[in-house]
């Protein structure tokens, strides 16, 4: 199963996503939920929705990996005038965004208010 196939299958409703793949995705959600719960107990993280956090992380990574061939063509043809992003750089970028986004407020500073 490639990332592109996974993305196509999920977008199509996941009817043909076999039990082993669903179990794997569910186990990844469990890991994210456990990390968020532990971070909450330790007061390192603020309370966030574990499913939305999981979807933000996994969705972003799967999309990055699945779009690599198109991105490579566009960069090579200079239609996308950027340097080729390394997977490790992208993973570090996502990690920093997520950790900063869920970090508990510093002592004495109120949490940022969500704009609605």
Image (cartoon, rainbow, N blue to C red):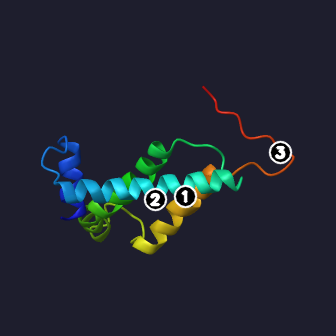
Query: Which residue appears farthest toward the right when viewing the image?
Result: 108
| Residue tagged 1 | 35
82 sits left or right of 1 in the view: right
Cα distance between the residues tagged 2 and 1: 6 Å
**Residue 67, visible in the rendered structure:** no
The quarter in which the N terminus is drawn is bottom left
| Residue tagged 2 | 31
- Give residue 18's position: percent from left, percent from top: 16, 54
- Give residue 14's position: percent from left, percent from top: 19, 45
Which of the marked residues, 1 or 3, is nearer the chain's N terminus?
1
Residue at image x 55%, y 58%? 35
Residue nearest the observer in this picture, 10 or 27: 27
**Residue 72, visible in the rendered structure:** yes
Q: Is residue 16 above or below residue 83?
A: above
The quarter in which the C terminus is drawn is top right
- Give residue 71's position: percent from left, percent from top: 30, 63
Q: Secondary structure at mark 2?
A: helix
| Residue tagged 3 | 109
């Amino acid at each position: 199963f490639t990332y592109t196939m996974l993305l196509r299958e999920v977008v199509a409703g996941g009817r043909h996503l076999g039990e082993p793949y669903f179990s794997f995705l569910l186990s990844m959600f469990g890991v994210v939920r456990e990390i968020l719960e532990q971070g909450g107990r330790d007061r390192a993280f603020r309370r966030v929705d574990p499913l939305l956090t999981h979807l933000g992380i996994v969705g972003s990574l799967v999309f990055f990996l699945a779009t690599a061939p198109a991105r490579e063509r566009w960069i090579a043809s200079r239609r996308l005038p950027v340097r080729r992003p390394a997977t490790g750089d992208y993973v570090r970028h996502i990690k920093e965004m997520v950790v900063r986004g869920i970090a508990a407020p510093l002592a004495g500073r109120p949490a940022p208010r969500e704009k609605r």
